[in-house]
Amino acid sequence: MGNNENYIKNLKTLKASFPDIWQKVKTTEATLDKSLVQAVVSKSGLANLLINDEYLYNQENPLDEAFAFIDQFKNIDSHSDILFYGCGLGYQIKAFRERYPDKPFNIYEPVPEIFYQFLHHADLGQYPPDSLKSIYIESHPDDPDMFCFSLVKKIRSSILIIDHPFYKKAFPDKHQAFFSHFEKHLRERRMSLATCSTFQKRWTINSMKNLAEVLSSPNILLEKKGFFKNKPALLVASGPSLEEEIENVRKIRTNGSAYIFAVGTAVNALVKRGIYPHAACTYDPSEENRIVCKEVLARDIQSIPLIFGSTVGYETLETYPGSKMHMLINQDTPASYFLKPLKGRELEYVNDAASIAVIALQLLFKLGFNPIILVGQNLAYLHGKNYTAGCTYPSYETVLADSNDAIPVKGVDGKEVLSNSSFISMRLQLENYLSSSQEIKVINTTKGGAEIKGTKFQPLAKVMKEYLRKPVVEEDWAKMNKHCYDPEHLLAQNLNMENAKEKISALLDRCMHDLTKIGEVATSDDLISIERSYEQFNLSMENLRSNLFFSIFVTPMSRVELEFLLLSIPEISGERDPAKKAQMMEKEFRPYLKTCEQDINTILPLFQELNNSIRQYYQNYQLQKKAASIKLLLLDADGILTDGSVYYSASGEELKRFNVKDRVGILRLQELGIKTVLIIPEGEEVLKNAAKKLGVNDTVCGNRNIERIISDIKKNFLLDDTAIACLFNDLCHPELFRTTGLSIAMKNASEGFRQDVDYILTTCCGEGVILEIAEIIAKSKSQY
């Protein structure tokens, strides 16, 4: 039984509308078990299928049964997406189409032999292209996983799966596998959307506000690449098992037998017990992340470096007392635009994750640590607790509040332990990264914790005897170059961004205007104007989305809204009624554009902060570049080394006060190979004697023309402009600064004088200005 003509007709329809499925049908046709499915005639004369002695439909009247089956679903209109699991011979789809003619749907057929019969008996041509959105045939064990992964990403608001009951009964394994994969991907999708909805704006805001910290701190992945290769590291989390290992961790820290990285609030638990890890790691974008460093802040501990993700809550960084170093997080869109590493290196990112432990594990992998030893990584409850004492989480979060939420999982000892959905998500992410880095040994020492695939469980005391027998820690490991990024590239990118920012409001207004125009012409009979209104709106939207300011800052802040907007476009494009189409566009696009408008207003002042940070970074770079070339410091003695006051002794002798810091500064300059030359007014014997005692290299008479003095110094010392730094008092003409490489003014110089120099000191005359200059030049020469 079957209709070959119908089969050929349906194949043509498949080839035209679903070429991938057509190819799959042609490929699998020869391998079908055609004895599995037998086509028979029902009592009503309609075709039915007999599979393993069971009828797919009721033998009395398959179509009546199909209508009754569809009618039991009372909320079909409330769902944005419909999927038929099992097409059978299409009767339930026919009933659905009659009841809901305008509702699009998808088909997933788990049994190719049934789909083969469907093509012989149904008519694909009765389903308009805007009605049947997709067809999928399962022919490989991996198909359900791949299909469900793709499906859940396309769900606009909710999905109804019309699951024909025959399939669960006849093919239980296939049915169970499909819905298991569907539930898994749907759960992950919900978590992803929830995370994005919660943090999409904070990611961008934090990235912008944190840029100053990123520019002024070392990138650990750039500066320490290869430094830790094959060194052991402890990744210490705040699970309840940490309490049992405190003394072991203390011994490891004392002996320096492994680097200790505390993740999340574990740093608080360690600090309370007098253990200072080699670094603390943090990444959470929320404002509440400040709790992570509560004990460090309370005790003003400055000796624990903080490794922060670039999208971390900016509040965390504002008050942290210790040194900082950063890692770039892949959610940091501005970083990829603004930052270009020096020395031809490439940016490396750490992927955002559900847990700081997953972030830190990626970091330790990239840094080359081996082995990596997990401590306190329970990912389960222990004696009803899920956090160790002293980690500063609120008490209501540290106990198992509702046993109904607990999920039994396999523990490190093979027995069941109670976990929850959040812990399971973290564990799965850990296992995913572990599976891709099998060459690194990861040891889980967490007693009473959940089993983590890809790790080996071993008590910490045994690990210490086997792997941590000698000191490996270099105590100055955290000393590294803070200037990682190309200032010229940064400034150029910022100038482009400023230009884009100036256009953003006009581009957005144009989109709003063009959307309104669509609604105005939609009810007219002028088809040319209607079509032009669509074209103009599309062009305006493209101009907006391609704007740098919009794509780097605004788009990531409303990524969830954009995702759902894009899912609505096929339906809008398929609408032929201009009035309905205009309504659909207004409903979908206007809220998105309004959201973008709000986001722009939020970040405009943040962009000004970012702009200032970039300009300050560039100015510091220019200063240090100039300072690194200095070989001679030329300065006025009077009003620079002295405070400008004149003192008299009891005998009437004129006295002047000098600062011993200047002598220290001159000696420091000499160590750097830099000469110091003082300009001393003629007859100032006090200044001449002071110059000798301070150890200056040379003095010149200040009654001569300053311009001539500078010219003679260049000639006598064989120097060009860039090799001379100058510090003059307010009597000097500012034009002279342009004839030297680095011009400096004191803190208390006149306002007009200060505007013409490269750098303004933090010290005033007579307070040891040469020492401050020496420190600036020394720092610059070490970096350039």
Image (spheres, grey):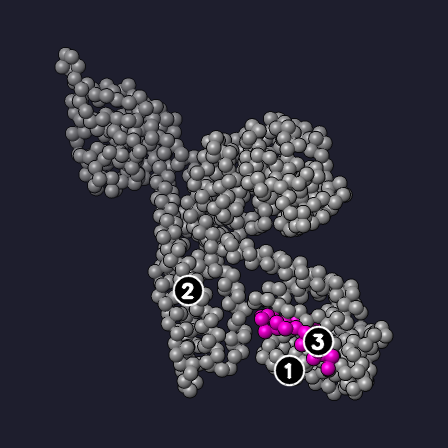
Q: Which residue matches tag 1?
A: 98
Which numbered disc covers residue 594?
2
From the viewer's perspective, is 38 left or right of 74?
right
Q: At 61% across and 28% down in the image, what residue appears? A: 250
Magenta span: 64-87
Marks 3 and 1, how far apart at CA: 13 Å
From the viewer's perspective, is 631 left or right of 433?
left
Q: Which residue matches tag 3?
A: 69
Q: Is residue 546 above or below residue 65?
A: above
Check disc 1 and give the amino acid type. Glu
The mark closer to the camera, 1 or 2, is 1
99, 570: nearer the viewer: 99
Q: Position of residue 186 (x, y in %)?
A: 63, 61
Check disc 2 and give the amino acid type. Lys
Mark nearer the N terminus (3 vs 1): 3
Q: Position of residue 437 (x, y in %)?
A: 66, 47
Please tell me whether residue 78 belongs to the stretch shown in magenta: yes
Marks 1 and 2, how far apart at CA: 39 Å
Binning the other alpha carbons within 10 Å of mark 1 as few (below 14), some (14 to 19) or many (20 upward) gives few
The mark closer to the camera, 3 or 1, is 3
Mark nearer the N terminus (1 vs 2): 1
17, 218: nearer the viewer: 17
Counting the numbered discs, the total is 3
